[in-house]
Image: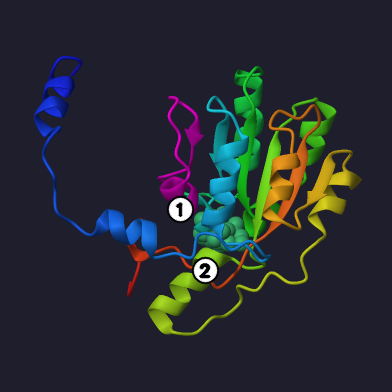
């Protein structure tokens, strides 16, 4: 592999493959919505400027996971952990605590959906009592967004995906002894400490109508 891959890359260097994928991926979404509720892509762009390259990102399951997989560039090995196979909601936050124990010198950040985080928010107690500081970025679209999207694309109607009433995530975090932050503008994200000393839960309002583009996940459309 070590020998062959550089040779293949060299052969492909000047080859231009005509396709629309790159264009579709970069142009099909409104990227820079500066007012809340934000688009996932605008938030991910901002996050990338804040967190250093050695940050370990751990995703939850759902739209936020697919947006992160497609729009959060990572360059260091072992810095993007996602449950790509079984996709069990509630994986992300506990897995990020494990990552922090394994790699205490690297910042660890969970990219969480509101629905997924609600399944494991009690692990804030584990995090606080064992002093395992991570950042939890909640992409709060008020819905089981992935299921909402699938219901719309398959049946053109939605049911039982609205998560209201949701808790105040910042207050919930504070009640466990963690730090809670609610984001009002995209630039508020830049005030975060990428490697906080205490677990920090960040509530980020996300537009629930934004869907993952169909080129970004395999079971789009009628299923
Ligand atoms: C334990 C579990 N229950 C149900 C599902 C099915 N499921 C996949 S994504 C999803 C919604 C996730 O909602 P949220 O965490 O808010 O993320 P969003 O899609 O809104 O970004 C559900 C219910 C699952 N993957 N795991
Ligand atoms: Mg959600």
- Seen in the picture, residue 191 relative to 156 is either above or below; the reply is above
The span picked out in magenta is 66-86
Q: Where in the figure is residue 35, as x and y percent of width and height?
A: 67, 65
Q: Quadrant of ligand 2?
A: bottom right
Say which element carries label 2: loop
Disc 1 or 2, which lies upstream in sequence? 1
> Going 67% across and 53% down the picture, which residue do you hit?
186
Residue 176 belongs to magenta span = no
Residue 72 belongs to magenta span = yes
Magenta portion: prevailing SS class: loop
Residue 218 or 13: which is nearer the viewer? 13
Label 2 CB, ligand 1: below 8 Å?
Answer: no
Mark 2, residue position = 210
Q: Where in the figure is residue 76, as x and y percent of width and height?
A: 45, 25
Query: Rounded to the nearest whole Å, what is the CA distance between mark 1 and mark 2?
Result: 12 Å
Q: Residues within 10 Å of mark 2 (few under 14, many from 20)?
A: some
Q: Residues within 10 Å of mark 1 (few under 14, many from 20)?
A: many
Mark 1, residue position = 66
């Amino acid at each position: 592999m070590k020998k062959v891959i550089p040779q293949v890359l060299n052969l492909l260097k000047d080859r231009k493959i005509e396709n629309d994928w790159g264009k579709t991926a970069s142009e099909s979404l409104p990227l820079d919505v500066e007012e809340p509720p934000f688009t996932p892509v605008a938030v991910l762009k901002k996050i990338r400027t804040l967190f250093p390259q050695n940050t370990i990102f751990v995703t939850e399951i759902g739209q936020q996971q697919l947006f992160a997989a497609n729009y959060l560039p990572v360059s260091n090995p072992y810095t993007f952990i996602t449950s790509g196979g079984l996709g069990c909601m509630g994986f992300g936050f506990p897995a990020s605590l494990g990552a922090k124990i394994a790699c205490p010198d690297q910042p660890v950040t969970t990219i969480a959906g509101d629905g997924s985080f609600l399944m494991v928010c009690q692990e804030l107690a584990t995090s606080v009592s064992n002093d395992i500081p991570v950042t939890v970025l909640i992409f709060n679209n008020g819905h089981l967004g992935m299921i909402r999207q699938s219901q719309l694309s398959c049946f053109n109607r939605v049911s039982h995906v609205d998560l209201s009433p949701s808790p105040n995530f910042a207050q919930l975090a504070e009640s466990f002894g963690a730090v809670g932050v609610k984001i009002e503008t995209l630039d508020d994200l830049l005030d975060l400490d990428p490697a906080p000393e205490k677990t920090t839960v960040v509530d980020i309002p996300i537009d629930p109508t934004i869907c993952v583009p169909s080129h970004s996940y395999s079971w789009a459309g009628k299923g």
